[in-house]
Amino acid sequence: MLLTPQTRTSYPDDRGSALMAVIGVMAVTLVIGLTITAATINALGVTTASKASVQARAAAEAGVDMAAVGLLTSGSCQAVGNLYQSLPGDIPKYTATIWLPSGTNWVRGCPSPTTSQVKIKSTGDAQAQGIAGATSGNSRQVEAVYQYIPAYPGVPEIVSTGAAIYAETFAATHNQFGLVDPIITDSILADVQIGTGDIDIDCKTNGGIAGSVIAGNGNIILNNCDVAGSVHASGNVKLTGGTVSGDVIAAGTVTAGGTVNGSIWAGGNTAVSSSTVKKSIIVAGTGTTSATISAGSTILGDLLSSGTASVATGAVQGVVRTGVGGLTPPPAPVIPHWVDVPYPYAYAASTAWFQTSTWKAQGYAQMEWAGAPASCSVKNSEAAWLSSIVVPTVVNALNCPDGITTENNVNPIDLNANVAIIGKGFNIDKLKLTGVGGNRKFWLIVPDDLVNSDPTCVRPAGKPTLGDIRLNNETDTVASMSVMVYTPCNIVIDRNNWRGQLYGAQVQFNQQAQMNFAPVGMPGMNLGGLVPIPPIPAHLGSRLSFRDLS
């Protein structure tokens, strides 16, 4: 049977329905695509903004770190105009500025030696910034507040000519003590340096000490003393009355009842009463160390304590800070080692040795004490031949078995040259020295022949005071004379108007002795100490706070 295919006839009412279906499907697909694209773009924006925020925060923190490092160098803030910033093109990118407290506010500025705190504000920029308008993380700002430690006082310097008074020990308590008249043109202060033991001085009516007072291994107690330099002790310091023109530095405690024109720097508890301190007080001990400022005291600077502080209302005009970390305890003073001055031979056995001595190298000649050993006192005849010396001379008097003495009626000695007398001891009852033709130097020396950086006092049997130098009664030197007294034994001074230096194992002042300082030293020898430790400058302390500003 033959089949014939039939063709479906389309009716006008259903034409285009298939096209609408296609368009509908396409529209739905487009909406879904746009939704996915928008979600993707938004997600990318959030992701890049978050990444940018992390980078910007890291850059801002880097700015804080770089500014903090910069503040460790004196003058750095001023040198960069108070703007620490990265170089163009550098990563991370930051700008940081320094701010200082001003009342209850902060002002932009560079710290000074008396600044108590600093704030660092830093803005960091992201390396890869956010996209699709997500700019919130492109820049971040942070701030950090640090303690700022003021400059520490400088440790007193010990010059090569030596101190006005150098002793391994200082005998007993000294009443009505006076050390005056430094040579201001030489800028050398009249220091008192004691190696071991306490320094206990009551200046009373004699005024004070025209230099620094330094105790290498002991305490310092000063009553009514005006000190032209500083006070520095390995132990404690106690001041009653008087004025210290420099600083008070103690590895131990400080008790102050006078005026300090500089600062107080202590390693132990510090108590200030009825006093004025014109700079700051730094108590650099432990967390239990205390500072007590009583009513009637005025502290013009700041008070910093590693521990606690009790302060009378209005007593401290600066900032009071407690629990301060990173404070440096004061160093103990380093007193120079004893300098041995040998002269091992009596005349004439000393002739060969003298040719290689420092005396010879400094242009001195040697002569024998005339009349030794029979005549070893300074009478008018000895005064005459001492006055006749016209070149720098060492007089060897070691042939005098009991040392050198003076007679009460001896004439003044007019020195025309620098003269040193080497003897086994000196007992000076009357001695008046003047310089002719200019300033002259004079030495009384008991030698220390054992070179061991310690005083070695050798006393023969039955002679318990041989080796000592005693300056009694009318022992006066005028302004044209400077006298150095040296012995590894004891020095006892019992008279005003002595001018020069004292260098002994033990030094003792009796009655109302007053000494006028003039540097003499030892020819060719260094009586000073090591190179002084530079003072610690003002510097950044520990961080107190850190926060985001954006």
Image (cartoon, grey):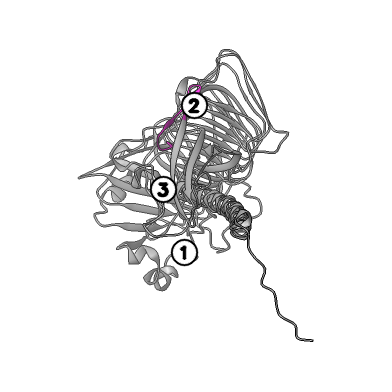
Q: Which residue is mark 1?
A: 346
Q: Residues within 10 Å of mark 1 (few under 14, many from 20)?
A: some
Amino acid type for the residue under numbered disc 3: Tyr
The tally of labels here is: 3
**Circle 3 sits on which residue?**
84
Where is the N terminus found, in terms of image quarters? Answer: bottom right
For label 3, the SS is strand
Q: Earlier in the sequence, mark 2 or mark 1?
A: 2
Q: Could you tell me how far apart the alpha carbons at marks 3 and 2 are, in whole angstroms? A: 29 Å
Name the amino acid, label 2.
Answer: Gly
- Read off the residue under disc 2: 301
Q: Which residues are magenta?
A: 101-114
For the question of whether residue 469 can be seen, the reply is no
Please identify the residue farthest to the left as the structure is shown: 437
Image quadrant assignment for residue 500: top left
Q: Left or right: where does residue 364 sit relative to residue 462?
A: left
